[in-house]
Image: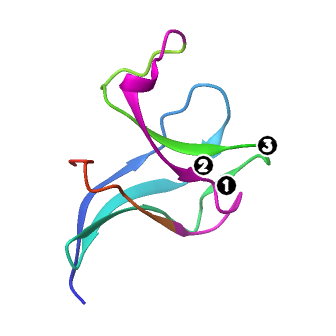
Amino acid sequence: MASLVAESESFNTLEHRIEGKVSFIIEDGISYLEFDKSFKTKNIPDFKINLYHGNILQKYGIKEKDYVGIAPLQKISSSQRYALPNNVKL
């Protein structure tokens, strides 16, 4: 099972503090978004993972076409992994 880390970054957020690192991983032809073991945030109802299409995140006026919804947050701390839809190009 070969894997490739395409990118590893800190979180860029608008409203809520998030700690840890996020990586984009390609494994067996499937792309994943992976949070490392230091990931931590507050318990926020209905927290969803989204990927924004731009380089500069805007606080207001974000439209549905500006991001891709990935999944609801699995847990508020520790490592976790999310498969990316096939239409997401890293």
Q: Which mark is residue 19?
A: 2
Q: Which residue lies under the disc numbered 3?
A: 45
From the top left corner, tell me how far across and down residue 16 is, in percent: 68, 33
Residue in the image at 31% along x and 25% along y: 54
**Residue type at the position of mark 3:** Pro
* Residue bounds of the magenta highlight: 60-80
- Where residue 12 sits in the image (x, y, percent)? 48, 35
Residue neighbourhood size for the residue with mark 1, other residues' Cα within 10 Å, grouped as few (<14), some (14–19), many (≥20) = some
Q: Which type of secondary structure does the marked residue at label 1 adopt?
A: strand
Q: Is residue 68 magenta?
A: yes
Of residue 72 and residue 36, the one placed in the foreground of this image is 72
| Of the image marks 2 and 1, the number of the one nearer the N terminus | 2
Using the image, tell me which numbered label, if any, was put on residue 40. 1
Viewer-proximal residue among 40 and 90: 90
Residue displayed at 32% across by 30% down: 53
- Residue 60 at what x, y percent from top left? 54, 10
Could you give the CA–CA distance between mark 3 and mark 2, rounded to whole angstroms? 18 Å
Distance between the alpha carbons at the discs numbered 2 and 1: 5 Å
